[in-house]
Amino acid sequence: MSNATLRTWVAASAATAIAITAAHAQVGWSPLDRTNQAKSNQNTGLKPHPTPVTVTPVEKIPVDKLTLPAGFKAEIWSHGHPGGRTMVRGDKGTIFMGTRGPGRVYAVTDRNGKREVKVLMQGLTQPNGLAFRNGSLYVFAIHQVFRYDNIEDKLDNPGPPVDLTKAYNLPDTVHHNWKYVAFGPDGKMYVQVGANCNVCEINPGIHGQIRRYNADGTGMEIVARGVRNTVGFDWHPQTGELWFTDQGRDWAGNDGPQDELNRIPRNQEGAFYGFPYCHANGTPDPDIRRPNPCSGVMMPAALTGPHSAGLGITFYTGNMFPAAYRNVAFIARRGSWNREQKFGYDVVIARTAGARAVIQPFMGGLLDTKANEFHGRPTYLLQMSDGSMLVSDEQNGATYRISYSAPRTAKR
């Protein structure tokens, strides 16, 4: 199959999903959201905050607005990749970026001392899920799964991929199913399958899960259930436990239910995390009811704020940042999409201790609380080989490099 034929086939097979996505991309909701809003007996006076995916000129990217602890510095590392979200690094240093709305996968390279951005693939349906291993790039676009072997040697012409779609057998529903995927310490592929609604009774055998597969798509297991929408997870460097962000339901008011940071204890794989009956630290859902809704629910390690939209989470293991940040989780909060007083649009840290965590601020400045306006949407993080950290900004089509150097002490 030629590369041109492949692109045509991918576009055709995803045409229906792309049409749905495009129709609602500017406001960020789907017909299911409208249905659940109408059913909800809670606050329905909320409205989405449109976030058009545009190419922001480099001189207008608001890096000067970013605030960080003393000694940390933010600078623009790359730009010109509108909608760029997830990031993975190839063995030869290529940074691959997935998207939700634009349907693109980017490759960012350093060539002759200059950073270049290439549209590697396009016409896919929300290819947010990327993973890299042994020279191969895995691309998850809702239910479609492709593996591009030796990709860093073929950036100008990737050629036809290995199609793993049938092997993974993922549902083709679009709502809350843009993927986050990652290889775990066990060499298995971990895959999120979100809820196919804002809040509703779901089929627990299909939706609201984190799954685990062999890399070829065989051997599927469910490692977490009752998870509404996690699009970010990572493993604790010391305990090996999987920690994940989870976004709470909408249309139930400005102040909740709060989003969550959860963990999967080693001896409790397959645990139930509450959706759709129980949210946050034991808040019963006002619309989807059952007796004792929070009984048997694994409670979160921490709450991450009302409609903060936590996405990427990365445990820091480098040596550039001060020792106090080692093994600390960094979380990108994209920011609320329909909360009246906007919240999030930042990066926070989670200091973990056993089953609990404490959330603290780290990178701010993109939200003007007085004007109730935001100037960017942080989405994912990637630790670089030198210990610096990249933060992708979906709205501005840029990444920020966060570095650290010890502040100089004043001479007396």
Image: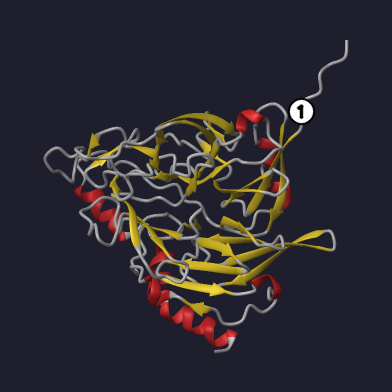
Q: Is residue 30 left or right of residue 12?
A: left
Q: What element carries label 1?
A: loop
Q: Residue at x 50, y 42 (%)?
A: 236
Q: Is residue 23 left or right of residue 107?
A: left
Choose between 351 and 266: the one closer to the eye: 266
Q: Mark 1 points at which residue?
A: 406
Residue 273 falls in image quadrant: top left
Choose between 47 and 160: the one closer to the eye: 160
Query: Residue 64 location in percent, x, y?
Result: 70, 37
Q: Is any atom of residue 123 visible in this view?
A: no
Image quarter in which the C terminus is found: top right
Query: Residue 109 location in percent, x, y?
Result: 73, 62
Q: How is the image coloured?
A: secondary structure
Q: Which residue is drawn at 70% across and 74% down?
A: 153
Q: Which residue is drawn at 21% across and 44% down?
A: 277
Q: Is any atom of residue 270 visible in this view?
A: yes
Query: Residue 294 location in percent, x, y?
Result: 21, 37
